[in-house]
Image (spheres, rainbow, N blue to C red):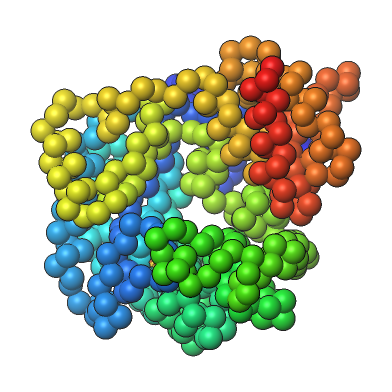
Amino acid sequence: MHACPRSVRIGSAVQRLTHGGWVPSFCLPPSADPVGAYIHLPFCKRKCLYCDFPVIALGRAVDVAAPVPAIEAYVGSLEREIAATPAQNPHPLQSVYFGGGTPSLTPPPLVERLLHALERAYGIAPGAEVSFEADPGTFDAGRLRSLQALGVNRLSVGVQAFQDDLLHRCGRSHSVAEVHAAIEAIHAAGVPAWSLDLMSGLPGLDPGAWAASLEAAVAAAPTHVSVYDLQVEAGTPFAAMYRPGQEPLPSDDAAAAMFGQASECLRGAGYEHYEISNYALPGSRSRHNTMYWSGSSFYGFGMGAASYLQGRRFSRPKSLPAYLRWLEAYREGPRESPGAELPPESRRDVLLDAIMLRSRLRDGVWLTVLEDIAGDKRHEPALLSALEPHVAAGLAWLERDGEGAATHFGLTDPEGFLLSNDVVSDIFLALDES
Ligand code: SF4
């Protein structure tokens, strides 16, 4: 646990300055002015069997080096959406995130057009984090150098497993050999920051294979590791094939053991377990995701993308035809934020969001932040009494100042992180009844 870091107010955006640039700070309220932008690039070679993201499959044989008319047309739509969306912060973007889909299928000249569109509309701050999701088998060192020349300074690489049989079972389009080639390319290109993403809970995954994947991940020397537990989403092929907790998926106990195994292995290798699913070397936390978890506002662009502007969460349509129809109607309408017709979130909703999102973080939840959001401290007695049994059971911690007043709380690692839903539900219940 740490003391509140030194902070600076820029306009109404509350930010923290470090040598590495801007990072959201968890003892300060969320920024109401958007400080980041998410761009959804939905194209993949094929759709993985567990995936419920808005994705357009191009086919495994797609030539990564050749222009793809569908991607070019979509980038044109994104440019129009960006140009139509008014700026809501006089200060430039501190974070840009290209997610998907498989953004690394998008040729660098098209990425350059999108960065220019963002620069024209909002500005991009010097030192901004510019992240790019990339899948093995879709890039080489040359492509990474081209992306870096445009300003991309962080990659998020969807490895998921180091076993060909597991990758095949999930319908991934890459092999383990392509994973190793991707890691070599990242090091050859000198990418300064990159995340290696793994999935636990895959069908047939056993503790031995999981340990091997964790060791291989550490050996690849990424600056960040994300570990997501498989969720069997309705409507996916996996939902028709598997039942959560039943073989060949791991039991709840086995899944919990894998979570603990990951935490022990990665922390032992020097990674900080800073969020339930995320680990980083010191100074290498994802600034963009940290912005989400802090509840700050952000722009979103593209098919299925979410934005959070002026207290309104808005998701664009998830199919391409519906997104294009929405975009044309939006461009013809008044120059307002997308979703401006929706009611803004109430203070109560923002308070509950802050408790839910920030309790996922090792830094925990600062009571001063909750007070700032709620406008008073009336929620505090119920919250602290709901937390008390979880502190006693070793699932949560509570810090106090020198005078004994509670300052911030969080969940223990791994016990509390594993049961975060239970702890947060108890807090919500207590707040409802207070
Ligand atoms: S690569 Fe990612 S976005 Fe594309 S289908 Fe697979 S899980 Fe979904």
Q: Position of residue 293 (x, y in %)?
A: 55, 40
**Residue 112 visible in the picture:** yes
Whether residue 13 is situated above or below residue 379 in the rendered picture: below
Ligand 1 lies in quarter: bottom left
Task: Report x, y in % for residue 63.
Answer: 24, 80
Which residue sits at x=43%, y=33%? 297
Work out whether residue 233 or residue 294 is closer to the camera in this orientation and state it: 233
Left-right relation of 276 to 34: right
Compared with residue 284, is residue 245 higher up or lower down, i.e. above or below?
Answer: below
Q: Quadrant of the N terminus?
A: top right
Instruction: Name the residue located 34 percent from the left edge and 47 percent from the top edge.
Output: 305
**Residue 87 seen in the figure:** no
The part of the image, by quadrant, that contains residue 7 is top right
Q: Is residue 244 above or below residue 31?
A: below
Residue 217 x/y as whole percent:
62, 73
The image quadrant of residue 221 is bottom right
Q: Nearer the viewer, residue 42 or 153?
A: 42
Task: Estimate the x, y position of residue 133 in percent, counting from the top left.
Answer: 42, 62
Looking at the rendered structure, the number of numbered marks drawn on it comes to: 0
- Residue at (12%, 41%) from the top-left corner? 328
Screen quadrant of the C terminus:
top right
Q: Residue at x 52, y 34 (%)?
A: 295
Residue 276 vs residue 349: left or right?
right
